[in-house]
């Protein structure tokens, strides 16, 4: 009986290995079989990039290398203001005409502004891509910027600022940037200060368009049911007349400063805190190991179950020792710099212990992280990477962002290979480089009395290696 049982176990184990190998092979094959991303550069410098998956729907958009980083203290907020003005009518059609046209197509037209990019995009049926491209081209070239609409949007943006101020995570991250990159454009908020919003004029908007909406800084991205050849023809037709009328704006480096900012309000029940170090830019070779390390730390919320069995040490500690209500690691990247850290929400008496455990986990990443933990994080990162590309809109966004950042789109199989190449020693070396004896940046809002003094937090970034 024992011999038979051993034989059964051996066969079962062998069967599991065969299935695992088959699954791995199917996964690798799926990565290679993804439709290629095609890239064409028009005569005026506009880059057209697309992935044709043959879907019934498509997302097309214009990704522009212009955001709050390209503003100064006097016009901070103008890029976001322009985003609001985009759908308020052009010289060819009124706001009502524009809204009716989009509504009759059953399409979705949207836009957003970040610190380094401004984006206008449309999601529609594949057959409506030509109309969507024409609308997007009309918006960025012929916005009417009528004075009554400017005044109306001024009030809308001021109300939006009030909404943002009620989102404490947004507030903390704005403070984090302001203190990490103090005195530089990355330290400015995307919406801009109230005093700027109240005085931004039509001339300011026109000047920003003239300076930054240059063909060499625009990417037309498409995903879903899009033919690349037709997309190039449409780009030539509707955007080919754009000319580079201004010299390219130099991207000034944004100096990082280890520091802290605390907005104490004891009337609030919970403290919202972010602690970070300077991270890597998009093109930095250390970015992939930092992404794996970020995934290894993970995220946790008290409303989730099973944290005591979570693979993340910090999640287990947060659950079993009641360290916080929630936390999430983050890796925010820009062209030449970034912020890598943890944001958490905790009760006043939990803060000190939570900061201690965060730095303990950072210490572990530099000295004693295990092979099993790294493999788990790599697999999770790959899964998240694929899940985030589920749909035409996230694929279109990925294409636009990567073309602006790298001037190409990294194929999934290449990105998978880069993640696979990360090993335990990579994680230890890169984390030691970015974490050990580095000056952190801290932003805290709420009842922050329990947050250790900055010099103590700074001291926690150093430990004697045995």
Image (cartoon, grey):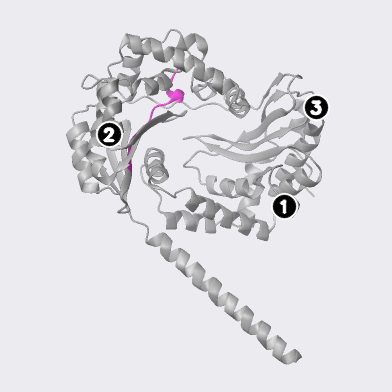
Q: Which sits in the foreground, 242 or 127?
A: 127
N-terminal-most mark, 3 or 2: 2
**Residue that label 1 marks:** 306
Measured in 3D between alpha carbons, the distance from the residue under mark 3 to the one under mark 2, in whole angstroms, is: 56 Å
Numbered badge on residue 104: 2
Query: Does residue 161 sit above or below 348 in this rendering?
Result: above
Q: Are marks 3 and 1 in contact (CB under 8 Å)?
A: no
x and y, in percent, of residue 456 in the image: 79, 30
Give the magenta-colored segment's residue range: 59-72
Q: Is residue 67 in the magenta section?
A: yes
* Tag nearer the camera, 1 or 2: 2
Q: Mark number for residue 450?
A: 3
Q: Which mark is residue 383?
A: none
Horizontal side of 189 relative to 411 (left or right) equals: right
First reached walking from the N terminus: tag 1 or tag 2: 2
In-image side of 285 versus 305 (left or right): left
| Residue 444 on image: x %, y % | 69, 25
**In contact (CB < 8 Å): disc 1 and disc 2:** no
- Cα separation between marks 1 and 2: 47 Å
- Mark 3 element type: loop
Which is closer to the viewer, label 3 or label 1?
Answer: 1
């Amino acid at each position: 009986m024992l011999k038979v049982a051993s034989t059964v176990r051996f066969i079962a184990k062998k069967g599991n290995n065969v299935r695992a190998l088959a699954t791995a092979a199917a996964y690798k094959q799926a990565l290679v079989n993804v439709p290629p991303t095609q890239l064409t550069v028009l005569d005026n410098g506009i880059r057209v990039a697309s992935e044709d998956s043959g879907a019934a729907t498509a997302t097309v958009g214009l990704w522009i290398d212009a955001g709050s980083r390209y503003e100064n203290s006097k016009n901070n907020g103008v890029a976001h203001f322009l985003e609001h003005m985009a759908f308020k009518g052009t010289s060819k059609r009124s706001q009502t005409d524009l809204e009716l046209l989009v509504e009759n197509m059953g399409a979705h037209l949207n836009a957003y502004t970040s610190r380094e990019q401004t984006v206008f995009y449309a999601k529609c049926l594949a057959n409506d891509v030509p109309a969507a491209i024409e609308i997007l081209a009309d918006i960025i070239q012929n916005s009417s910027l009528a004075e009554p609409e400017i005044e109306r949007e001024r009030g809308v943006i001021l109300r939006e600022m009030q909404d943002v101020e009620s989102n404490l995570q947004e507030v903390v991250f704005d403070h984090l940037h302001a203190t990490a990159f103090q005195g530089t454009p990355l330290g400015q908020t995307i919406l801009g200060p109230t005093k700027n919003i109240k005085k931004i004029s039509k001339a300011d908007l026109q000047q920003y368009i003239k300076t930054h909406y240059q063909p060499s800084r625009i990417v037309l991205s498409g995903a879903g049911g899009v033919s690349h050849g037709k997309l190039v023809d449409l780009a030539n037709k509707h955007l080919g007349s754009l000319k580079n009328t201004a010299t390219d704006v130099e991207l000034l480096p944004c100096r990082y400063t280890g520091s802290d900012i605390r907005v104490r309000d004891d009337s609030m029940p919970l403290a919202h805190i972010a602690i970070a170090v300077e991270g890597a830019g998009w093109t930095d070779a250390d970015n992939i190991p930092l992404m794996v390390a970020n995934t290894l730390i993970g995220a946790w919320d008290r409303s989730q179950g099973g944290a005591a069995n979570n693979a993340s040490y910090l999640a287990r500690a947060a659950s079993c020792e009641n360290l916080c209500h929630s936390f999430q690691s983050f890796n925010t990247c820009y062209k030449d710099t970034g912020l890598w850290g943890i944001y958490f929400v905790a009760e006043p008496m939990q803060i000190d212990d939570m900061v201690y455990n965060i730095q303990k986990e950072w210490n572990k990443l530099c000295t004693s992280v295990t092979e099993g933990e790294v493999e788990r994080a790599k697999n999770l990162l790959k899964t998240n990477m694929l899940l985030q590309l589920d749909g035409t809109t996230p694929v279109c966004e990925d294409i636009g962002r990567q073309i602006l950042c790298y001037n190409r789109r990294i194929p999934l199989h290449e990105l998978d290979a880069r993640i696979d190449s990360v090993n335990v020693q990579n994680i230890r070396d890169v984390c030691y480089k970015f974490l050990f004896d580095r000056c952190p940046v801290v932003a805290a809002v709420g009842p922050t009395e329990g947050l250790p003094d900055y010099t103590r937090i700074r001291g926690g970034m150093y430990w004697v290696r045995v």
